[in-house]
Amino acid sequence: MSAPLTLSATEPGDFTAGSVYFIGNATTLIRYGGFTILTDPTFLHAGDHVHLGHGMYARREVEPACQIDDLPPLDFIVLSHHHGDHFDDVAAEQLNKDVPIITTEHAVGLLSEQGFTQGHALDTWQSHTVAKGEDEVRVTAMPAKHDPDPVAGMLPPTMGSVLDFSRGENRSFRLYISGDTLLHDRLYDIPQRYPDIDLALVHAGGTTLLGTVVTMTGEQAVRAVEIVDPRTAVPIHYNDYSVFQSGLDDIKQAAASSSTAAEFHYLDHGETYHFHPSDGG
């Protein structure tokens, strides 16, 4: 584990309630324990296109719920990978270049080229802690597999993440973010190493490139929830780009027949999920 990133705090954080604001795609604003965290920032407008590499493009189909100027001050960003539909040109141009970004080694290199000065690289199972006084959030990289054999090497390395919020020695809330991944055997390691997940943000969409599915379909996303076993699951990354082939209805249908005990909450762009750890998430 690298040395903690220490931020200034004017008062202790609120651990009684938190929220996830769904901006669009994999972009969410998480507020809990005095921390304000942005994930996978993309703010292009509907109708704009992103370059996905190797001559591939995707059109944004849904307007993001807000723009960067609308955001509160950020403590840090968790970035699953550096790809056009997860860190776009608007983010590169308008985000504060000094904002800490916790991500993959590959992404840190690209961010540095774009002028960002506080990239923190993690490999699978490595952690980085952000602290405000006695309040901490520890970000640990989780295994993710984005590129199946037909397109191996064409997509950037990616990671899932677990965010553990705590005050002193007392963990209050555990949040899992799948990142862009397919179902793969290493997902089974997550609940073994990190049980008792309170909330999972699950990337779905069935992203299809060159005829190959590279993110989970709705049915597969529900299967991932069964594996990881969170108390609550919120699907994201399901309809924003033209390369998505499996929408929210697929998730709802699969969840309705699933054996998982997880409670599913569904968000449209601009909606907020509020959680209360004292009530079990």
Image (cartoon, rainbow, N blue to C red):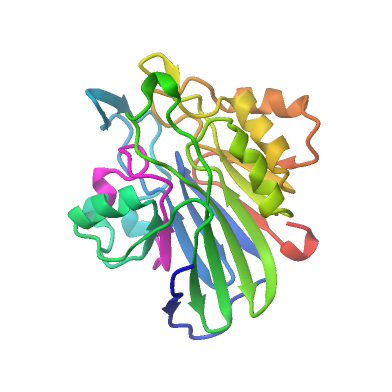
- Which residue corresponds to the image point at 73% horizontal and 63% vertical from the top-left? 277
User: In the figure, is residue 234 to the left or right of 240?
Assistant: right
What is the quadrant of residue 114 in the picture? bottom left
Q: Quadrant of the C terminus?
A: bottom right
Q: Residue at x 67, y 63 (%)?
A: 173
> What residue is shown at x 60% (from left), y 50% (from top)?
176
Number of numbered tags placed on the structure image: 0
37 relative to 59 in the view: left or right: right
The part of the chain drawn in magenta is 71-91
Q: Is residue 30 above or below residue 189?
A: below
Q: Is residue 75 magenta?
A: yes
From this viewpoint, is residue 13 visible? Answer: yes
Res 207 → quadrant: top left
Left/right of residue 249 with respect to residue 278 in the rendered view:
left
Magenta span dominant secondary structure: loop
State yes or no: residue 57 in magenta.
Answer: no
Q: Is residue 16 visible?
A: no
Image coordinates for residue 118, horizontal then vertical, percent: 31, 66
Q: Does 194 sit left or right of 79 as displayed?
A: right
Q: Is residue 36 above or below residue 61?
A: below
Q: Which residue corresponds to the image point at 54% horizontal and 54% vertical from the top-left?
A: 125
Q: Nearer the viewer, residue 38 or 158?
A: 158
- Residue 154: give x, y in percent of width and height: 32, 28
Q: Position of residue 48 (x, y in %)?
A: 26, 32
Residue 78: x percent and y percent?
A: 44, 55
